[in-house]
């Protein structure tokens, strides 16, 4: 039987109720518990917090880097104005510089690999050019591949929120297609989806062997997005 969570860490049911400062405090307390009993206090070295244990090697260095201001850029000209307005309504007035650069390459038909930290906005690097292309040409299709079904579902929720803002301009179909997709829904996905969210296993077992049924997708396929590329290296094709 697993024991209770370490002191200071909230259970998953209570995490959403914590403020950012409370979460930080809980995390710091948990990390502090990893230090051996003889660990030194946190010192200031060159303006950076550092904690180095005197004995043991559980945590050798603890550093907190100061926040840096975000760097923004202008949208590439090819990004549809209707999409810009939808993003602005969601609080995104301008893209980060890596988003703008990735989008510029994508709309110009270049292959792009985006490598940035977690929660840096990589999803909008591909959603923006894909949705913009669909707005301008409703025949456009895109295939998104994720390593897990759970991740595909998370991304679908984000996509549906954005396509709902675009509903007055176009009806954009986004659907997952995996082992959990009911048989009676699969035909609808093949016929109605502008964006198909799937995974490599389903691509090989459920899509490519039946490619004539997917003629509408493949004949109009403009974008293929591979999320979490590092997890699929050497195993996709």
Image (cartoon, grey):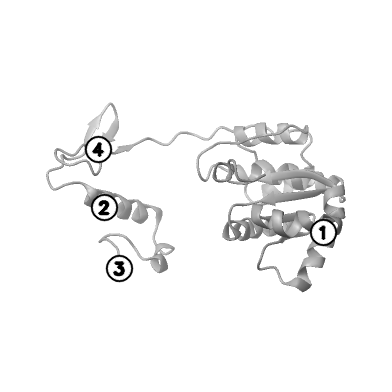
Of the numbered discs in the image, which one, if any, rests on residue 144?
none
Question: Can you tell which quarter of the image residue 203 is in?
Answer: bottom right
The N terminus lies in which quarter of the figure? bottom left
Residue 149 seen from this side: yes
Task: Assign the C terminus to one quadrant of the image.
Answer: top right
Mark 4 or 2: in front is 4
Q: Tell which circle, 2 or 1, labels the residue nearer the N-terminal end.
A: 2
Q: Nearer the viewer, residue 204 or 193?
A: 204
Residue tagged 2: 29
Query: Is label 1 in a helix, a strand or a loop?
Result: loop
Spot occupied by residue 218 in the image (x, y as percentages of width and height): 83, 49
Q: Nearer the viewer, mark 3 or mark 1?
A: 3
Precedes in sequence: disc 3 or disc 2:
3
> In this rendering, is residue 104 above or below 184?
above
Number of numbered discs: 4
Q: Residues within 10 Å of mark 1 (few under 14, many from 20)?
A: some
Looking at marks 3 and 1 on the same chain, the residue that comes earlier in the sequence is marked by: 3
Q: Nearer the viewer, residue 231 or 133?
A: 231
Residue 34 vs 150, above or below: the answer is: above
Alpha-carbon distance for marks 2 and 1?
Answer: 49 Å
Q: Residue at x 40, y 57 (%)?
A: 19
x then y, percent, for residue 46: 28, 26
Q: Nearer the viewer, mark 4 or mark 3?
A: 3
Q: Pointer 4: what residue?
A: 60
Above or below, 183 against 31 in this view is below
Front in this rendered view, residue 234 or 89: 234
Q: Looking at the image, which residue is at 73% across and 44% down?
A: 224
Residue 124 image-quadrant placement: top right
The residue that mark 1 highlights is 171
Residue at the location (15% across, 39% down)? Answer: 40
Give the label on residue 2, or none: 3
Image marks 4 and 1: residues in contact by CB distance under 8 Å: no
């Amino acid at each position: 039987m697993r024991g209770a969570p370490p002191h200071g860490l909230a259970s998953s049911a209570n995490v959403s109720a914590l403020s950012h400062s409370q979460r930080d405090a809980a995390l710091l307390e948990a990390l502090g518990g990893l230090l051996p009993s003889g660990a030194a206090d946190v010192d200031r070295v060159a303006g950076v917090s550092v904690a180095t244990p005197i004995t043991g090697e559980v945590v050798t260095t603890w550093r907190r880097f100061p926040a840096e201001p975000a760097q923004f850029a202008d949208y590439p000209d090819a990004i549809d104005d209707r999409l810009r307005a939808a993003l602005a309504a969601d609080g995104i007035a301008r893209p980060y510089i890596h988003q703008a650069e990735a989008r510029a390459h994508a709309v110009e038909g270049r292959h792009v690999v985006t490598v940035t930290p977690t929660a840096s906005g990589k999803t909008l690097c591909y959603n923006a050019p894909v949705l913009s292309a669909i707005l301008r040409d409703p025949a456009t299709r895109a295939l998104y591949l994720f390593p897990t079904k759970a991740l595909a579902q998370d991304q679908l929720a984000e996509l549906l929120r954005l396509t709902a803002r675009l509903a007055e301009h176009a009806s954009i179909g986004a659907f997952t297609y995996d082992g959990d997709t009911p048989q009676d829904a699969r035909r609808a996905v093949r016929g109605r989806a502008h964006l198909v969210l799937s995974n490599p296993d389903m691509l090989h077992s459920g899509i490519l062997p039946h490619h004539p049924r997917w003629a509408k997708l493949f004949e109009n396929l403009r974008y293929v997005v591979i999320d979490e590329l590092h997890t699929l290296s050497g195993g996709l094709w």
